[in-house]
Image (cartoon, helix red, strand yellow):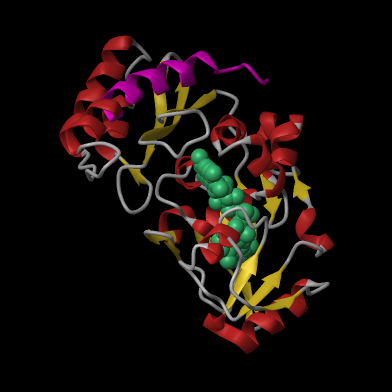
Amino acid sequence: MKNPPFNYHRPATVDEALALLATYGDEAKVLAGGQSLLPIMALRLGRPEHVVDIGTIADLKQTNTADGVTFGAMVRHAEAEKSPEVARHAPLVAAALPHVGHRAIRNRGTVVGSIAHADPAAELPAVCLAAGATMTIASSRGTREVQADDFFEGYFSTAIEPHELLTQVHFPRWSETAGGSVVEISRRHGDYAMVGLACVADVQNGAIARAALSFFGVSSKPVRVTEAEEALVGKPPTEEAFAEAAAIVGRVLEPGGDIHATTQYRRHIAQVLTSRGLTEATSRIGELT
Ligand SMILES: Cc1cc2nc3c(=O)[nH]c(=O)nc-3n(C[C@H](O)[C@H](O)[C@H](O)COP(=O)(O)OP(=O)(O)OC[C@H]3O[C@@H](n4cnc5c(N)ncnc54)[C@H](O)[C@@H]3O)c2cc1C
């Protein structure tokens, strides 16, 4: 299907991109990898008058691994997937990437684009929440930082204003005593998840010191189940502790129902994934050190 007509802009620098976004405001859309925006336009679900293609801005193509991992807005999924540095310093991102669509999509799509797009069934927004990522948002008026907890607002909705650009996303240094996993149930590999979980367990002196359980595909945005996380703290990483956390998830989580899965089925999957995710996460502790 052909796209509707639009004005195409290809800024060479971040400043040029910000000037275009300031001029056109909510008539403009940023184009990164185009793996979501172009289908949306082709299906007439969105009709921006102006498309600002950031694909040639060299400053946005960097991955910095000095202190944790910082992804510039044009780092593609496939580049991050191949990087041993990303696997070492942002293992939760590395665990999520193979689940994101298909290889052809990951060859063009970007890590930051997935986060800006904020599909509630996408893996990377949930990873941001579990790993405590920080978003850098720029406009012609300056730059601000937003924590993942405050960034995702609802269905495809984030703290980014129409005149702003998400220039980078930073994942803090990974603890050597932590393990992480991304587990999900989808009909076919590469489909969006019916329910998924990004999971972190930091085990110190034989007991869980910190846990993060960040679910996707259950609500209008990724959600953490803090009651279950808190119940894990101080316990040894055993099957019993994981089963107890799963039972809490079953009581607390209120997933929506739709044509893909009922509320009851999603709740059941979420419980199964809690035990599975924690088992996998704790088995990975020390793998990369
Ligand atoms: C068949 C299919 C299956 C897929 N399966 C999955 C899946 O399982 N999991 C998953 O997570 N995704 C999936 N996707 C989506 C894919 O991962 C997209 O690539 C990703 O969601 C967006 O990244 P992009 O760089 O292509 O962004 P684009 O398509 O270029 O942009 C997406 C949206 O984000 C905005 N945006 C992008 N970058 C910025 C920025 N730096 N600042 C401000 N706004 C920005 C755009 O304006 C647009 O609104 C699938 C896509 C397809 C077509």
Q: What's the residue at 42%, 15% (across, down)?
A: 279
Q: Is residue 7 left or right of residue 245?
A: right
Q: Specify the quadrant that holds the N terminus.
A: bottom right
Q: What's the residue at 63%, 69% (across, down)?
A: 30
Q: Given the current orientation, which residue lies at the most extreme front position?
A: 1
In the rendered image, the vertical position of residue 212 relative to residue 279, given as above or below: below
Q: Specify the quadrant that holds the C terminus.
A: top right
* Image position, residue 253 (x, y; %): 22, 39
Magenta stretch secondary structure, dominant = helix
In the rendered image, the vertical position of residue 3 relative to residue 20, given as above or below: above
Q: Quadrant of residue 88?
A: top right
* Image position, residue 204 (x, y; %): 47, 20
Q: Given the current orientation, which residue lies at the most extreme bottom position?
A: 23
Residue segment shown in magenta: 270-289
Q: What's the residue at 63%, 39% (across, down)?
A: 173
Residue 212 in view in this figure: no
Nearest to the observer: residue 235 or residue 260: 260
Q: What's the residue at 33%, 54% (across, down)?
A: 220
* Image position, residue 4 (x, y; %): 59, 73
Q: Is residue 286 magenta?
A: yes
* Image position, residue 223 (x, y; %): 34, 45
Nearest to the observer: residue 139 or residue 286: 139
Q: Is residue 14 magenta?
A: no
Nearest to the observer: residue 258 or residue 3: 3
Q: So how many labels did they put on this image?
A: 0
